[in-house]
Image (tube, rainbow, N blue to C red):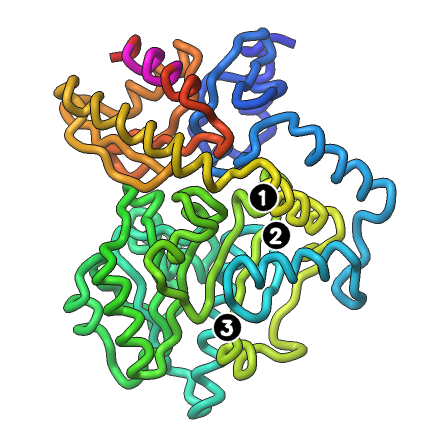
Amino acid sequence: MKTNEYIEMGEKYILHTYNRYPVVFEKGDGVYLYDVEGRKYLDFAAGIAVFALGYGNKEYNDALKDQIDKIIHTSNLYYNVPAVEAAKKVVEATGLSKVFFTNSGTEAIEGAIKAARKYAWLKDKSTDHEIIAMNNSFHGRSMGALSVTGNAHYQEPFKPLIGGIKFADFNDLDSVKAQVTDKTCAIILEPVQGEGGIYPADPDFLKGVRQLCDEKDILLIFDEIQCGMGRTGTMFACQAYGILPDIMTCAKALGCGVPVGAFVLNEKTAAASLVPGDHGTTYGGNPLACAAVNKVFELFEKENVLENVKTTGAYLEQKLDALVDKYDCFKERRGKGMMQGLVVEGQPVGQIVNKALENGLVVITAGTNVLRLVPPLVITKAHVDEMIEKLEKCL
């Protein structure tokens, strides 16, 4: 079938919750995607920061094929080898203590919220605890995750959401302190805000929030679903700040395409929160998903992914800064490593995204006016140059 035929069929049978771009992708190879007409696209979106290793990595693909031939699913009523091995890798990578595997980032946020509320409930048996989240944040679309997402546009049609949520301003410690009461049980934030417009946290802000939580026995939750797994140059973004949370959520590049997420707890929180019967999942942590997690960690080390993010990411920043100097439509660059945003003014950012697609470049947006670049973490400087050339054609 041709592109328009697939699109017509998709519109007929798929619930219209996305305004999709008029392209039908069929396959990927390295850092390139190909549509059903055979056109080639340089991918600087990576499935929204998911496909960190690029497409067609033979070792990754073989690991999944091998696991399919062994066993795909058993349920969490039993141990399975990939889950145990993946748990060790995630715990060691985060520097925390215990992990719970989920199917998605949104589910990881749900688990983190439940763990925080259970921790507080065990202290005083009260059910009126509060969580402080950040304005301009994004944590997911389920009712719990939506409740801590600081964007009224996403929330309005679905109220009432879960109660006890207050919002403060990101990178404003006084704003956070103003929301704290003796009912506050957790503070949740992204070390680098993603969907909200690519805003890295100020070091003093994160340090201040961590100190505040320590003083008042408030749990600090870091959402590293998008900014984690090497995206900013360290395995998790918070590690560059030298600050660890009590609970961390991750997903996206954790499985590099296989749906898997996790929330990870430190020893204090794990010992005094969720127990058997409090939380569960049918598919979370199944052998296939965890086989993907294991291979991702192995390949990150084998292919020196973090070092490439640091070196090629610095080159990407340099080239993007030059674009900001050259073109009036770009107000500034924000971001860390391979999580970058160009602030667009004077024209809709969607126009640039559409033009880029026409020129064989896949980029996406963030917030209302940010061009977001979150490529596979294995890109080279040559790919950055190719991206810049295609983007300049659009401009």
Per the image, the residue denoted by label 3 is 266
The range drawn in magenta is 386-392
Q: Is residue 249 left or right of residue 335?
A: right
Other-residue count near label 1 (Cα within 10 Å), few / some / many at <14 / 14–19 / ≥20: few
Q: Could you tell me how far apart the alpha carbons at marks 1 and 2 are, in whole angstroms?
A: 24 Å
Taking the magenta stretch, the answer to whether it contains residue 19 is no
Mark 1 or 2: in front is 1
- Dot 1 or dot 2, earlier in sequence: 2
* Amino acid type, mark 1: Glu
Q: Are marks 3 and 2 in contact (CB under 8 Å)?
A: no
Residue identifier under label 2? 103
The picture places residue 337, in percent across and down from the top left corner, at 36, 39
Residue occupying the point 47% across, 81% down: 119
Q: Nearer the viewer, residue 254 or 14?
A: 254
Dividing the picture into quadrants, the one containing residue 388 is top left
Name the residue type under label 2: Asn
Q: Amino acid at mark 3?
A: Asn
**SS label for mark 2:** loop
Q: Which residue is mark 1?
A: 301
Could you tell whether 131 is left or right of 7 in the image? Answer: left
Q: Is residue 271 visible?
A: yes
